[in-house]
Amino acid sequence: MTSLLCAFITAFIVVLMVRAVLSWFPLQPDGFLAQVNRLAIDVTEWVVAPLRRIIPPVGMFDVSFLVLVFGLFILRGAIC
């Protein structure tokens, strides 16, 4: 059971990183990368949105996103 949870946390971190990297580039609305970006947003927004309401952005940096990623790394380190 622990290995399944570790795999889920790792996969979620990867999807968050894909979302972060793709947010840095202009994407064509109908392009493949835009679809990947939309999927990454759909998969992760349910966790990011509540944190974003609690932790406001600092300038143009989404601190809630960073808190989530670091929190997941800490959780994965404690469990795995």
Image (cartoon, grey):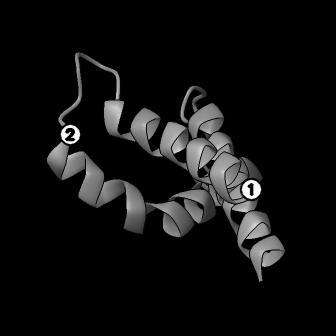
Quadrant of res 11: bottom right
Quarter of the rendering containing residue 61: top left
The residue carrying mark 1 is 10
Give residue 48's position: percent from left, percent from top.
38, 54
Q: Secondary structure at mark 2?
A: loop
Please state the horizontal and vertical placement of residue 32, each as a whole percent of the image: 76, 54
Corner quadrant of residue 68: top left
Question: Of 1 and 43, which appears nearest the observer?
Answer: 1
Instruction: Measure how far apart labels 1 and 2 are at the Cα level.
Output: 23 Å
Residue 49 in percent (x, y) is at 30, 57
Taking 44 as reference, is 59 above or below it? above
Please tell me which residue is depicted at 23% across the width and 29% down the height of the picture.
Answer: 57
Which numbered dot is residue 55? Answer: 2
The image position of residue 35, as x and y in percent, is 66, 60
Q: Secondary structure at mark 1?
A: helix
Residue 73 visible to the viewer: yes
Question: Is residue 28 visible from the viewing direction of this image?
Answer: no
Front position in the image: 30 or 67: 67
How packed is label 1: few (under 14 Cα within 10 Å), some, or many (20 or more)?
Answer: some
- Residue 3, compared with residue 32, is above or below; it is below
Q: Amino acid at mark 2?
A: Ile
